[in-house]
């Protein structure tokens, strides 16, 4: 970190700043210019985050050199992280497809969708048992019963399951049923929930918040990793912009940006990004071309009867056609699918 002092800073103020730097275990190097004094701080400047150095009298500005996150950064770990989900590897050269209904509805329907997506080439089944609905009058999910249906679908198909947690108190249920715990966009900055999933040894997929910057997204991932869980998968699912034609705006450039900044796998969810069935395939194709490590796509056998997000669900047959197209694109960009 480079700290620039205000002109006219007193010796006493200077001493106080140097003391604070040393207290944080860092080494200050003072560069006295003709008009200004600059302090170059050597060491992990994140130690100064607890107490903002800019609040000290005499400091004009502080320019960080390191990123504010550590464990998630590429500087910290060069090789890509591969998260092993019951044998399905997320983040390797082979891309991963997660698919299934928005919410778990009926047991037989879920199993039938699971069988269809498996035949089409998906490796992980998705389905929400706890749904973060905008309206309290909308279907809220089946809760534990839904988790049991998911477990049964896994038993029948062998597909690992991903499902969303909304409340830290549900962690025991999640540990029993889920193979990947999903943190939804609306909970990306629910720090107590992040700490809870961070304290367990179960893969977590963190979805980007509706209005979160990439920096905020990565700092949320840092919460999980700093609590002890290194098995973190990131998911770009579209962000809020001024555009209203689509549900959100898929931030495709976030894929290469995040892959440069971190070693964590990046999954793209085109379904929640666009909100309309006809837009899912084009954005899925673009995500593969842009370097995503996998996709999460909503699939339902009867979208018009779905309890949630029927407008964006693909029919199993259309999902199958899409997977065939994605295989060609994956190959063209040096990936397997
Ligand atoms: C979901 O994947 O079920 C979901 C609710 O998505 P998001 O949190 O991205 O809105
Ligand atoms: Mn949904």
Image (cartoon, rainbow, N blue to C red):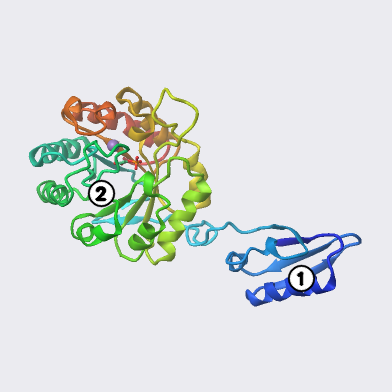
Looking at the image, tell me whether mark 1 or mark 2 is earlier in sequence order.
Answer: 1
The answer to whether 178 appears left or right of 293 in the picture is: left
Q: Quadrant of the C terminus?
A: top left
Q: Mark 1, residues whose alpha carbon is within 10 Å: few (<14), some, or many (≥20)? A: few
The answer to whether the residue labelled 1 contacts the one labelled 2, judged by CB atoms less than 8 Å apart, is no
From the top left corner, tell me how far across and down residue 111 is, in percent: 11, 41
Numbered mark located on residue 179 in the image? none
Q: Quadrant of the N terminus?
A: bottom right
Q: Mark 2, residues whose alpha carbon is within 10 Å: few (<14), some, or many (≥20)? A: many
**Circle 1 — which element?**
strand
Numbered mark located on residue 29 in the image? 1
**Closer to the camera, 128 or 7?**
7
**Circle 2 — which element?**
strand
Residue at figure coordinates x 75%, y 65% from the top left: 57
Whether 337 is drawn above or below 314: the answer is below
Which quarter of the figure has residue 193?
bottom left
Q: Is residue 17 visible?
A: yes
Residue at figure coordinates x 21%, y 46% from the top left: 129
Residue highlighted by disc 2: 162
Task: Return the residue found at the far front.
Answer: 137
Whether 263 is drawn above or below 283: the answer is below
Whether 186 is drawn above or below 80: the answer is above
From the top left corner, tell me how far across and down residue 62 is, in percent: 70, 58
From the top left corner, tell me how far across and down residue 264 is, in percent: 43, 53
**On the rendering, which quadrant does ligand 2 occupy?**
top left
Which quarter of the figure has residue 290?
top left
**Closer to the camera, 297 or 49?**
49
The answer to whether 191 appears left or right of 118 in the picture is: right
**Closer to the camera, 261 or 245?**
245
From the top left corner, tell me how far across and down residue 178 is, in percent: 22, 54
């Amino acid at each position: 970190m480079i700290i620039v002092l205000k002109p006219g800073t007193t010796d006493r103020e200077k001493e106080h700043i140097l003391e604070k730097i040393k207290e944080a275990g860092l080494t200050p190097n003072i560069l006295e210019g003709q008009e200004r004094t600059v302090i170059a701080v050597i060491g992990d400047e994140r130690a100064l985050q607890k107490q903002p150095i800019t609040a000290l009298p005499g400091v004009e500005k502080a320019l960080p050199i390191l990123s504010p996150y550590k464990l998630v950064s590429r500087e910290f770990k060069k090789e890509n992280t591969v998260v092993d989900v019951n044998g399905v590897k997320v983040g390797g050269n082979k891309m991963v497809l997660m698919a299934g209904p928005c919410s778990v509805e009926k047991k037989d329907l879920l199993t039938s969708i699971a069988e269809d997506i498996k035949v089409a080439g998906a490796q992980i089944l998705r389905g929400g048992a706890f749904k973060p609905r905008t309206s309290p009058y909308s279907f809220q999910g089946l809760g534990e019963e839904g988790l049991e249906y998911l477990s049964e679908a896994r038993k029948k198909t062998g597909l690992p399951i991903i499902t969303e947690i909304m409340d830290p108190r549900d962690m025991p249920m999640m540990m029993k049923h889920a193979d990947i715990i999903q943190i939804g966009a609306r909970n990306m900055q629910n720090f107590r929930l992040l700490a809870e999933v961070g304290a367990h040894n179960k893969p977590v997929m963190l979805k980007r918040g509706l209005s979160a910057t990439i920096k905020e997204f990565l700092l949320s991932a840092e919460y999980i990793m700093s609590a002890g869980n290194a098995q973190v998968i990131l998911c770009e699912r579209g962000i809020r912009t001024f555009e209203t034609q689509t549900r959100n705006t898929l931030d495709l450039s976030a894929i290469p940006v995040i892959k440069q900044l971190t070693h964590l796998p990046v999954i793209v969810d085109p379904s929640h990004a666009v909100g309309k069935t006809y837009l899912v395939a084009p954005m899925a194709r673009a995500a593969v071309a842009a370097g995503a490590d996998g996709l999460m796509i909503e699939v339902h056998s009867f979208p018009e009867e779905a309890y949630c997000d029927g407008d964006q669900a693909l029919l199993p047959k259309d999902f199958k056609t899409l997977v065939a197209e994605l295989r060609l694109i994956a190959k063209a960009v040096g990936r397997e699918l």
